[in-house]
Image (cartoon, helix red, strand yellow):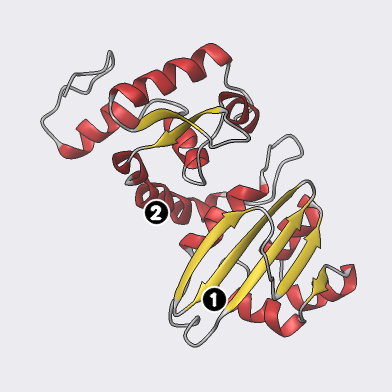
Amino acid sequence: MSKTPRSYNQFCALAKALDIVGERWTLLIARELLSGPKRFKDLHDALPGIGTNLLSARLKEMEQHGLVVRGKLPPPAASAVYELTDRGRGLGSVVGELVKWGFSLLGIPEPDEFFRPRWAMQALLVTFDPDAAKEVSETYEFRIDDETFHLRVSDGKAEGLLGPASRPDLVVVATRLEFLTLGFGENQRDYAVEKGLIKQGSVEMLERFGRIFRHLR
């Protein structure tokens, strides 16, 4: 495998991995692509602070290392997109472990910090407790400002998808601030009722969701 300009030049698996994914923005690009193929514009919009030239460079490097390929969405969209290869999707577990490790670093969101609800979907998935999900078959939909995602639990497994669910059991509608308060604060039951966040389903379903996805407690 070819070396990067800033290679650690070490015969070590960790060093070799960091030669490829240790550059700034690379893992965040992977984070965005883990939820599905994205147009260049979608990636740029989701990564405030990255210039178009730098994004192009990072995507080119990821292509060269077999992490990303360019493709097209099926009609009627037919848009050119970037998507992860099998090797690139292998970064999902790496990103998940870093998300879990980083929870304790979050604190209270700063006013100038950018937040996308889809990041919460990925964060919730890594806290999934299969034992708490036994014999549960439910779909939980979250409409957070202008984004919607849902998580489906069935047979002790979970998956998260962008967009609305076909038949959600629980629907929570909230602003970003309300959603973050719900996820990081205490007394989620009282807060959800006070703010009227549950538009379909019950408080008991929200509490069950919080037991299954342990971050929302």
Q: What residue is at 46 percent from the left and 56 percent from the top?
A: 100
Closer to the camera in the image, 165 or 29: 165
Closer to the camera in the image, 21 or 79: 79
Snapshot quadrant of residue 136: bottom right
Q: Residues within 10 Å of mark 1 (few under 14, many from 20)?
A: many
Estimate the x, y position of residue 109 in percent, counting from the top left.
70, 46
Q: Is residue 106 visible?
A: yes
Closer to the camera in the image, 1 or 159: 159
Q: Residue furthest bottom?
A: 135
| Type of amino acid at the residue the image marks with label 1 | Ile
Q: For the residue labelled by badge 1, is the local secondary structure a helix, a strand or a loop? A: helix
Give me the disc on residue 212. Answer: 1
Estimate the x, y position of residue 187 in percent, counting from the top left.
74, 75
**Alpha carbon distance from label 1 to label 2:** 18 Å
Judge left or right: residue 48 versus residue 21.
Answer: right
Estimate the x, y position of residue 33 in percent, counting from the top left.
48, 39
What residue does disc 2 label? 97
Rendered position, 157 above or below 25:
below
Q: Residues within 10 Å of mark 2 (few under 14, many from 20)?
A: some
The N terminus appears in which quarter of the rendering?
Answer: top left
Estimate the x, y position of residue 164 in percent, counting from the top left.
69, 58
Snapshot quadrant of residue 120: bottom right
Give me the disc on residue 14. Answer: none
| Type of amino acid at the residue the image marks with label 2 | Glu
Closer to the camera in the image, 198 or 152: 152
Rendered position, 1 above or below 74:
above
Q: What residue is at 36 percent from the left and 45 percent from the top?
A: 89
Rendered position, 158 above or below 144:
below
Q: For the residue labelled by badge 2, is the local secondary structure a helix, a strand or a loop? A: helix
Q: What residue is at 50 percent from the left and 61 percent from the top?
A: 125
